[in-house]
Image (cartoon, rainbow, N blue to C red):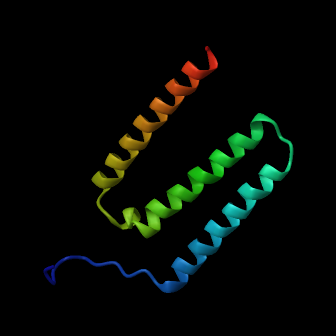
Amino acid sequence: MSSSENRHVVPYSTYIVILLVLLVFTGLSILVTSYELGPLAVSAALLFATLKTTLVLLYFMHLKFEERLFGVMVSVVMALFLVVLVITFFDYSFR
């Protein structure tokens, strides 16, 4: 690495806060499964999983501090994954 590159330094307190938020979301997703919510339980679990994935991508994989191109590429991959998931659920629901 050359000395002219911009470097970002994330304090440990940020990582600790993100870890605590991830643990809270994990606890909430476990708590949601203990109640009988029907189809909303799956939706809530997927929502918490999406939020946790976003936090991991932004902070632990440093996408928040990278060029926008990397964020666009990850977004395209996630959108493609979502399309494949929706098509799979449509196929499953019409069998």
Residue 77 position in % (x across, y down): 37, 42
- How many numbered discs sit on the rendered protein? 0
Would you identify the image quadrant in which residue 67 lies?
A: bottom left
Q: Which residue is found at the position 40% from the left and 35% from the top?
A: 80
Residue 27 position in % (x across, y down): 73, 63
Which quarter of the image is occupied by the N terminus? bottom left
Q: Which residue is found at the position 66% from the left and 69% from the top?
A: 23
Which quarter of the image is occupied by the C terminus? top right
Q: Is residue 31 above or below residue 3?
A: above
Foreground residue among 47 and 5: 47
Q: Which residue is outermost to the front?
A: 95
Would you identify the image quadrant in which residue 30 lies?
A: bottom right
Would you identify the image quadrant in which residue 21 lies?
A: bottom right
Residue 73 position in % (x across, y down): 32, 47
Residue 81 located left or right of residue 71: right
Foreground residue among 22 and 4: 22
Q: Which residue is outermost to the right?
A: 36
Residue 10 located left or right of residue 94: left
Foreground residue among 4 and 1: 1
Q: Which residue is found at the position 28% from the left and 78% from the top?
A: 7
